[in-house]
Image (tube, rainbow, N blue to C red):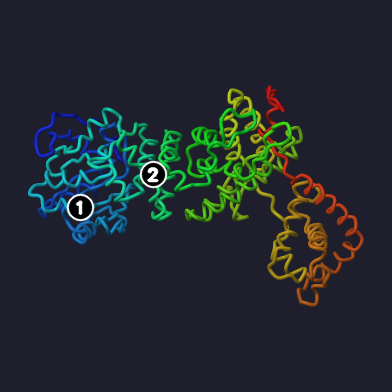
Amino acid sequence: MLRRACRVRAVPYKHAGYDGHMDSTLLASVPGPVLDIGRQLHERGRDVVLVGGAVRDALLEAVSADWDLVTDAAADEVRDVAMRTDRVRSLYDVGKRFGTLGIALEDGGTLEVSRYRPEALPAASLGERFAADAALRDFTVNAIGVDLATGALLDPVGGQSDLARRLLRAPAAPHERFAEDPLRVIRAARFVAELGFELEAATRDALRDAASALARVAPERVREELTRLLVAPFAPEGLRVMHESGALAAALPEVAALDGVTQPTFHDLDVLAHTIQAVGLAPATPVLRWATLLHDVGKAATRTVQLGGRIRFFGHAQEGARIAAEIVARLRFSAAEAAAIMHLVEVHMRFGEIDFANPRSVDRAVRKLDLRLDEAAEEPLVSAEDAVALTLADFGATAHRDQAPALREVLEGAIAASRVRGTHRPVVSPITGADIMRAFGLAEEPAVGVAKGAVEDAIERGDLESDDVEGAYVVAGAALQAFGGGVAGAEADPREEGHGDLAESYRVRQVLMGLVSLVVIVALLLLVILGVWRSVPREREAPPSPVRMAGLDVPA
């Protein structure tokens, strides 16, 4: 754990970019490996300047786990030094354009070492070289340096003054700075989100001109910047900067399209403004913030106006999940993150469909809201509690936001009671997909999942005990017969495949199936009809069931 960065004493400007000396307590907070690498480079006659977020955060009395050095040494020389340094876990290339080497530290945190820009290298002194390099950095508050050899504070572009004014300003010519790397447009919004600073006027204007160039930025870089923005303390302000600059339309056109999409009177904001406000209310985790950003992304495509002027968004959660799938694929999220985000978008209206007076209905919903990619996983990838958090953020950005505390009490109480009843454990079928394939002579195909799902549904409904293997095969067989008008192999005798005891038990089960299959099929058909009826889009502008249970005065 890094020690807390200590307060830095500001001193008057002197010469060549030097502003005096920092308190030695700041350097005491720098991790040992960073100081060791700096010392070794200095002993080789190299400049070593601590720069960027670590210095900025120290001046703001904040903690940093990421460190940046700038030097006149080439990347190969830095690599040689880093490999000789203790408590360095690994090295990796960050950007060949600027000769940046990434260094992962054993105790946590990272160090990136970059070479001065080519324009800065010919300068005669460290102060002049750093001043030339600082003028080419993204923002003045990130261009304050500390000479590790002397402790001298370097501020050639007025970063300290902008910190005091809480102003985000690009040094020199802003248009040139953003043209060098269009991702800086999103970085500007991200720093607004992290620091709560205002944008300087010329910098704000330059953002608008550079936003369209984001199309040529690698999607992974866009995703990482957006994620850091979304989890920041002032995320809504950052999103507004993105929208005003055109960066939102360039990076997430599906979200930008929500601007001006009006909603029913349950809301007092259009869809984009509602979404931005909801993001700030969601817990600051990447998955929940992304899911909140995308939860209503399907509304632009599904908006209809009925006779009498009533606005509806039939099926917007399902359409939103489809659009979210395209977005997470485009931005190259991991499979787990993508699944989690899509799941939350798809189920964000689900609490309006639960009968909260019926514990079995609640338990069934809770298990459906828990998402496990691995059946054996103890903890879900996404939980019903996460769905509650998204629902509360969604509700808190409506015209009835003052009633959110009562809704929270209802939802969290219902989930907690359900957990006590055992829903923290997933429903486990007594037979596996492999068992079903062997017993019914099936290859790996969708019908196997249908059969297994039917068994799990029967257990959830209380119609089948979780250890009833014989009954599970009966339900699976009936589901296979009903699936698509019948599945090849569903009635075959698996003894022909030489499955031993399993085949013999199956022969007995077939007799039972012959007696009960008709009843089971009729029951399944009724369930299918009920499921189809329930799946017909029935838009709810708010989750009505929990609202009514809370005694909230919300119009229908």
- Residue 230 against residue 552 in the figure, above or below: below
Q: Which mark is residue 75?
A: none
- Sequence-first tag of 2 and 1: 1
Q: Could you say which is closer to the camera, residue 96 or residue 408?
A: 96
Please, which residue is most extreme toward the left here? Answer: 124
Marks 2 and 1 sit apart, C-alpha to C-alpha, by 22 Å
Q: Amino acid at mark 2?
A: Ile
Name the secondary structure under disc 1: loop
Identified at 67% across, 35% down, the residue is 311
Q: Answer yes or no: do the residues labelled 2 and 1 have beta carbons within 8 Å?
A: no
Identified at 82% across, 50% down, the residue is 529
Identified at 60% across, 46% down, the residue is 320
Q: Is residue 529 left or right of residue 351?
A: right
Q: Quadrant of the C terminus?
A: top right
Q: Which residue is mark 2?
A: 186
Q: Could you say which is closer to the camera, residue 187 or residue 494?
A: 187
Q: Amino acid at mark 1?
A: Arg
Residue 395 in the image, given as x and y percentages of width and height: 60, 31
- Residue 55 against residue 405 in the figure, above or below: below
Q: Is residue 335 left or right of residue 436?
A: left
Please, which residue is most extreme toward the right here? Answer: 515
Name the secondary structure under disc 2: helix
Q: Could you say which is closer to the camera, residue 435 or residue 518?
A: 518
Q: Residues within 10 Å of mark 2 (few under 14, many from 20)?
A: many
Q: Residues within 10 Å of mark 1 (few under 14, many from 20)?
A: many
Residue 549 in the image, given as x and y percentages of width and height: 71, 27
Q: Is residue 120 left or right of residue 553?
A: left
- Residue 442 against residue 413 in the figure, above or below: below
Q: Which residue is mark 1?
A: 117
Residue 115 in the image, given as x and y percentages of width and height: 20, 53
Q: Quadrant of the N terminus?
A: top left
